[in-house]
Image (spheres, rainbow, N blue to C red):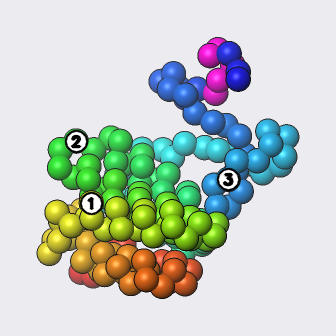
Amino acid sequence: MPAESDRDRDQAGRPRSARPRDALGRPLDRDGGGPPVEDPIPRSKAEALVRAQELLDAGQPFAAHEVFEAVWKQTKGSERELWRGLAQIAVGITHALRGNEPGSRSLLRRGSDNLAGFAGTTTDRVDVDGIRAWADVAVADLSMTSRPPRLAAED
């Protein structure tokens, strides 16, 4: 185990892993190639939603999870659960693509449950009902995870 001073840290001093990762977020050897992990830049919620959709569409749900997590951690009040739920949906997709079916189903359910308090709304332009409906179907049919949900509500 590395000494505390040997741990990777962000600018605020919080522990972070700079190890490269594969497309599904699995850590690689430090010298195993691949780009180092970059913490997502805190984004506006609108920018985060667009970026996360791009990442999901590109087959990078773990990176989308990181974007959602950055927003979740900087959000105060009840809206934290919205962004936490989105992060859980993205990591549920990640687990499905990694072949971890029980983990995927559990996180998709948990994400949908965390979005339930926002049902009938488009808080932060998030299509809550559409994402929850997608997640509920995906729990039963994990092949859906290869076709991620649309995140933004239609105007």
- Crowding near pointer 1: few (<14 within 10 Å), some, many (20+)? many
Badge 2 marks a residue whose secondary structure is loop
Circle number at residue 26: 3
Amino acid at dot 2: Lys
Find residue 34 and report its horizontal and vertical position in percent: 78, 51
Image point 58% across, 26% down: which residue?
9
Q: Are marks 1 and 3 in contact (CB under 8 Å)?
A: no
Q: Is residue 21 magenta?
A: no
**Along the horizontal axis of the image, is 107 left or right of 38?**
left
Badge 3 marks a residue whose secondary structure is loop
Closer to the chain start, of discs 1 and 2, is 2
Amino acid at dot 3: Arg
Compared with residue 141, is residue 124 higher up or lower down, i.e. above or below?
Answer: above
Circle number at residue 114: 1
Closer to the chain start, of discs 1 and 3, is 3
Badge 1 marks a residue whose secondary structure is helix
Circle number at residue 63: none
Foreground: disc 3 or disc 2: 3
Image point 62% across, 16% down: which residue?
4
Magenta region: 4-8
Find residue 71 and report its horizontal and vertical position in percent: 36, 48
Instruction: Specify the quadrant of the image occupied by residue 1.
Output: top right
**Along the horizontal axis of the image, is 56 left or right of 150?**
right
Find residue 89 and report its horizontal and vertical position in percent: 42, 65
